[in-house]
Amino acid sequence: MGVVARPAHEEGSTKSVSESGFRVKFWGTRGSLPVSGADYARFGGNTIAVEISCDDETLLFDAGSGLPLAGRALAADRTKTTHLFMSHFHYDHIIGLPFFCPLFNPRATVSLWSGNLHGQQTTQQTLKEIMRPPFFPVSPDICAARVRCMDFRATDVLEPIAGARLTTGMLNHPGGSIGYRVEWNGRVVALITDTEHEPGKLDDTVLSLIRGADLFIYDGAFEDHEMEKFKGFGHSTWQQAVRLAREAGVKQTAIFHHSPTRIDSELEAMEARAQKELSSLFFARDLQAVTL
Ligand SMILES: [Zn+2]
Ligand SMILES: [Zn+2]
């Protein structure tokens, strides 16, 4: 832990000081809608996709427009299963799924996990809904990979690979969203996206998922003064992240699900204000990597 986060493209010049094989890569950090152009060049504009590596095992979280980049970075001859965990199925978290190239690789195995719709529809049924006309030209039958659809319910503990333990919890979001606490080799990353807090309160589910985390990744789509205006939209603020981080004793906090309406200079100004409150907090950028 404690390695200062920096954009991945800077890694070549500064060797990682950690030998740990536990690593987080942000492939997409934008919420709601992908954006592009000069005003978004520093933070990037791809929607949510995060990779957590445990040595040579790969756990991916959400299938936003950043996911195809993660797919292209995986070796084409990879034989290990690639696990993809969904928080929920809103467009900004699924738009990259039909363009995730391991799905079309006959040598690949992909496990797709979801739990937010437990009891309503299965992961397999949801996949068929995403890949069907008139929204998409072909059905999941086109996938040459071995695709395993996995269902769980919030609060289940998942052990997709040896040595990793994923605790799950239901977040406060329209239709539900799953938060994940990923433990590996004594280190913890908590991934909490698409959740709305009640002003003045700390969510017990979130606190239990993030307790003592080495890295706490949180939905900071709004600011506190905007919460009244966007009540019911299902998102939170960097100020709430600060309050949660302090209460739960987390070591490092990353804000993501950035609003598509905010350009780089606005996000940098917000980040500077947030860091005055909590110096171990940063606003995540697309392609940024953190070693724990
Ligand atoms: Zn979202
Ligand atoms: Zn959502």
Image (cartoon, rainbow, N blue to C red):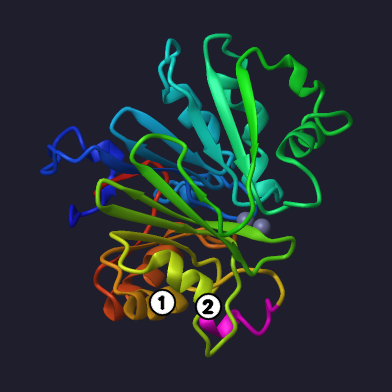
**Do the residues under discs 1 and 2 have CB atoms within 8 angstroms?**
yes
User: Which residue is the extreme one toward the bottom?
Assistant: 200
What amino acid does circle 2 point to? Asp
Q: Residues within 10 Å of mark 2 (few under 14, many from 20)?
A: some
Can residue 260 be seen here? The reply is no
Q: Position of residue 273 (x, y in %)?
A: 34, 77
In terms of image quadrants, where is residue 7? top left
- Horizontally, residue 244 falls left or right of residue 222, namely left
The part of the chain drawn in magenta is: 224-231
- Horizontally, residue 135 falls left or right of residue 67, namely right
Name the main secondary structure of what is drawn in magenta: loop
The span from disc 1 to disc 2 (Cα, nearest Å) is 8 Å
Question: Residue at point 71% right, 39% down?
Answer: 123
Q: Which mark is residue 244?
A: 1
Mark 2, residue position: 203
Magenta stretch contains residue 78 = no
Q: The N terminus is located in which quarter?
A: bottom left
Compared to residue 121, the image places residue 109 above or below, namely above
Which is closer to the viewer, label 1 or label 2? 2
What amino acid does circle 1 point to? Leu
Q: Position of residue 126 (x, y in %)?
A: 76, 39
Disc 2 is placed on an element classified as: loop
Disc 1 is placed on an element classified as: helix
Question: Residue at point 43% right, 20% down?
Answer: 80
Asked if ligand 2 lies within 8 A of label 2, the reply is: no
Q: Residues within 10 Å of mark 1 (few under 14, many from 20)?
A: many
